[in-house]
Image (cartoon, rainbow, N blue to C red):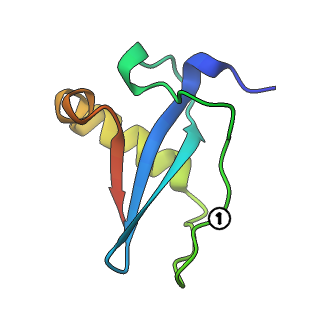
Amino acid sequence: MSNPNSMVLTKIACGGHEHEMCVSVGRGIPPELRCPHSSHGGGVSSGCALPFDLNELVERELREKLQESKRQRYVLVRL
């Protein structure tokens, strides 16, 4: 079972669409970025495949753009 404190609300931008999902990372995250629901993922439709390293991409965005992500209340990953 995933630690709810490490589930990040993430928006995946791909092909002109945004898809919201929860992504597990290997660290605790601020409360404003935690996933607010129990849905822990799923696929992205509209012809966009999730990268195998999505968790790493989310962690990089957290390192590089933490304040922006906190302001938006989600982590944005562009594919």
Number of callouts: 1
Q: Quadrant of residue 1?
A: top right
In percent of width and height, residue 50 lies at 57, 67
- Outermost residue toward the right in this view: 1
Taking the image as shown, residue 24 lies to the left or right of residue 13, namely right
Query: What residue occupies the far front of the structure in this picture?
Result: 37
The image quadrant of residue 66 is top left
Can residue 78 be seen here?
Answer: yes
Q: Nearer the viewer, residue 69 or 36?
A: 36
Give the secondary structure at mark 1: loop
Q: Amino acid under label 1?
A: Gly
Residue closest to the eye, 57 or 50: 50
- Who's the residue at 19% across and 29% down the image? 71
* Relative height, residue 29 to residue 9 (above, below): above
Q: Position of residue 22 (x, y in %)?
A: 57, 41
Q: Is residue 7 above or below residue 11?
A: above
The residue pinned by badge 1 equals: 43
Q: Residue at x 37, y 80 (%)?
A: 15
Q: Residue at x 53, y 27 (%)?
A: 36
Q: Nearer the viewer, residue 27 or 22?
A: 22
CA neighbours of label 1 inside 10 A, class few (<14), some (14 to 19), many (20+): few
